[in-house]
Amino acid sequence: PVPPRDPFRLLCLGRLSSYKFLGQLTVVKNARRLMRDIPSLEITVVGGGWRRMLFVREAAVANARAGRRVIRTVGYQTDPAPWIRASTAVCGGSTCGIEAILSNRPIVAMSGNWFGLITPDNLEEAVDCYYGERGGKFYLPENPEVVLEELVDLYKNWDQDRIASATRELRERMLPDFSPESAARDWEALLEEVL
């Protein structure tokens, strides 16, 4: 089930590469600003790479200024499922988008490109651009502030029943392509092709 809106536990999930990290860094750098509109905000950053130190520094500053632990950075995780399960919403692109959808969480999809909140109405478009990885509405560095606007909008317009219905529909539509049976068929087809 989708957790309630408060506390608003935002998970920034994904590799912290030069192409993928701008949206997550925008969230972390603007945590105090987001807290004005989302008082119960808690941010967890899951991802590694040398850029993690940027997040650790920004988290330390934001936490000190807020007087509480708003942001935690946990680095590489071999299994993101517990972190997704503990979240209210997820920010990420490519496979992170798939994982969030399959875990019944609202996903704000972005990578180098911006896509935004995935809904049943725009799922096909999200799949086509691989959740902001291979295209999107625009290149995220052109307007990184859109991430903050989308998160505040999601929080302010949160309707538990609508969110639950949308995430359930997204999961049901995505699941056939990512079921164990589907994966087994894909592996068998690949092996037949190779052998």
Image: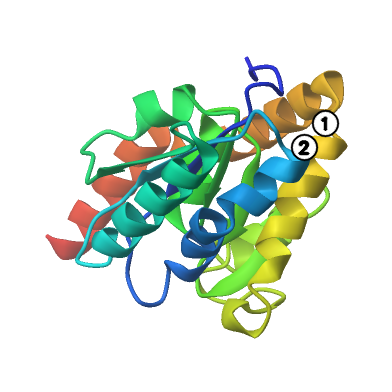
Q: Which residue is mark 1?
A: 158
Q: Is residue 89 left or right of residue 57?
A: right
Asked if the residue under mark 2 is in contact with the one under mark 1, i.e. CB atoms within 8 Å, the reply is yes
- Observer able to see residue 119: no
Residue closer to the observer: 165 or 70: 70
147 vs 105: above or below: below
User: Horizontal and vertical percent for residue 104?
Assistant: 60, 28
- Image quadrant holding the C terminus, namely bottom left
184 vs 20: above or below: above
Residue at the location (20% across, 66% down)? Answer: 50
Q: Is residue 160 left or right of residue 5?
A: right
Residue closer to the observer: 180 or 17: 17
Residue at the location (27% across, 67% down)? Answer: 51
Q: Is residue 26 left or right of residue 44?
A: right
- Observer able to see residue 53: yes
Residue closer to the observer: 122 or 93: 93
Q: Which residue is mark 2?
A: 155
Mark 2 neighbour density, 10 Å: few (under 14) some (14–19) many (20 or more): some
Residue 33 badge: none
Residue at the location (66% across, 61% down)? Answer: 147
- Image quadrant holding the N terminus, namely top right
Amino acid type shown at disc 1:
Trp
SS at mark 1 in the image: loop
Amino acid type shown at disc 2:
Tyr
User: Horizontal and vertical percent for residue 92?
Assistant: 50, 54
SS at mark 2 in the image: helix
Q: Is residue 100 left or right of residue 79?
A: right
Residue closer to the observer: 20 or 152: 152
* Residue 82 figure quarter: top left
